[in-house]
Amino acid sequence: MKLIPHPAHPPKTIEAVEVEIGMTDGDEILLRYLVRGSGLLLPEAQSPARADELWMTTCFEMFVMPEGEGDAYFEFNFSPSTRWAAYAFNGYRAQMRDLALVVEPHVEREPELEPEDGEPHYALEADVDFSGIPPGALRVGLTAVIEEADGTKSYWALHHPRDEPDFHHAGGRVLELPAATAA
């Protein structure tokens, strides 16, 4: 799926941001974010751990709203540093708290690559356990904050519902995932 940059914050050297999403089993989602273009600023690699404010630089995100849970939703952040964050909200930016996870996300950064077309690209994979998320159908927003070497920041999403970037807005959760079927 192709993400689109917010028109109020366009990129300078980044050509595209894409996301692949797949269910590996009933409780696990695998995400692969791909950034095409030069000038991408990557945070330094660190030991995998929970960390806050990852969105201050290049960061890949997922917002998940389970059907039947009112306005409650969850936010996941994945940094190229291999740090991650997971939060729960009772409503729009309301009562933010760390989301307790049974299994921590596994974030793997791939080295910057030169594909056959000559366009540099970078990929990040995140394996996320959803066993702590209420079962059922989900509405998902896939997003990214991309920082370039010159300090330019662009905000990418499947859909931008507002004049300014706002990944927390429910209108950005346009991907519908059906309830997992029992194996």
Image (cartoon, rainbow, N blue to C red):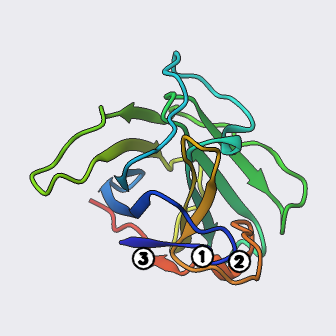
Q: Is residue 57 visible?
A: yes
Q: Residue at x 39, y 42 (%)?
A: 127
Q: Is residue 45 above or below residue 153?
A: above
Residue 175 falls left or right of residue 147: left
Disc 1 crowd rating (10 Å Cα; few below 14, some 14-19, many 20+) is many
Question: In the drawing, does residue 3 fall left or right of residue 26?
Answer: right
The picture places residue 165, in percent across and down from the top left corner, at: 72, 70
Find residue 83 and report its image quarter: top right
In what element is the residue under mark 3? loop
How many tags in the picture? Answer: 3
Asked if labels 1 and 2 touch by Cβ distance under 8 angstroms, the answer is: yes
Q: Is residue 51 above or below residue 63?
A: above
Residue 91 locus on image (x, y percent): 84, 67
- Percent of width and height locating residue 47: 52, 15
Q: Quadrant of the C terminus?
A: bottom left
Q: Residues within 10 Å of mark 2 (few under 14, many from 20)?
A: some
Q: Which residue is mark 2?
A: 170
Badge 1 marks a residue whose secondary structure is loop
The furthest residue to the left: 116
* Between marks 1 and 3 in the image, the one whose residue lies nearer the viewer: 1
According to the picture, the residue beneath numbered tag 3 turns out to be: 178
Q: Secondary structure at mark 2?
A: helix
Report x, y in % for residue 85. 64, 38
Specify which label sits upstream in the sequence, 1 or 3.
1
CA distance separating discs 2 and 1: 6 Å
- Residue type at mark 2? Ala
Q: Residues within 10 Å of mark 3 (few under 14, many from 20)?
A: few
At 52% from the left edge and 22% from the top edge, which residue is drawn?
A: 44
Q: In the picture shown, does residue 161 fall above or below 177?
A: below
Q: On residue 173, which mark appears?
A: 1
